[in-house]
Image: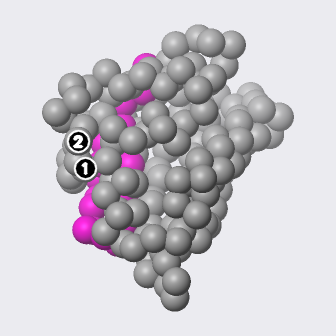
Amino acid sequence: MLHTLRAKQFIKSDLDTVWRFMSSPANLSKITPAYMGFEILSEAKDIESMYQGQIIEYYVKPVLGINMHWVTEITHVADKQFFVDEQRFGPYALWHHKHILREVPGGIEMEDLLHYKLPFGFLGRLVNRFYVHRKVEEIFDYRYKVVEEMFN
């Protein structure tokens, strides 16, 4: 079963500034909760700016401090409009995350559209219902708070 999460946030800034921040993989650790132990393994020079086909490798510790290896690919980039990251290796059977930026009166509307699926069929659906979905929402809530503090 495919799970979906949508999130929107208004940012009081200009498109160039928001795009520059959000499209830099180097900033991922700034918008990820510290308890996740987010560690980028890719070389610093390879994550300064985003491009289509980019591979980003990192460790996260989402459960009990256990390191999980995660590799994503930036599959689509439309400059100052949207980008998509997809998991290539990691804990999900599917991870497709589209980040959309739109100019609106007074600033930028940032929208996320996430589709994900856990492995293990019925067991994966159960784990999602009681744990993973809440964790994913918690991560997005944290990012919302950090972006509010930084820009608003």
Q: Is residue 13 above or below residue 53?
A: below
Mark 1: secondary structure? loop
Residue where numbered disc 2 is placed:
48
| Percent of width and height locating residue 22 | 39, 54
Q: Name the residue under label 1.
A: 50
The picture quadrant where one finds residue 9 is: bottom right
- Does residue 133 appear left or right of residue 78 in this picture? right
Q: In which quarter of the image is the C terminus?
A: bottom right
Which amino acid is tagged 2?
Answer: Glu
Separation (CA) of disc 1 from disc 2: 7 Å
Instruction: Name the amino acid type tagged 1.
Output: Met
Magenta range is 69-85
Residue extending farthest right: 130
| 77 sits left or right of 132 in the view | left
Q: Which residue is drawn at 52% across and 88% down?
A: 105
Colour logic: one colour
Given residues 121 and 8, the one toward you in this image is 8
- Identity of the residue drawn at 52% across and 42% down: 31
Residue beneath the point at 46% across and 34% down: 29
Q: Which of 143 and 12 is in front in this view?
A: 12
Q: Where is residue 48 in the image (x, y as percent from the top left)?
A: 23, 42
From the top left corner, tell me how far across and down residue 56 is, in percent. 30, 34
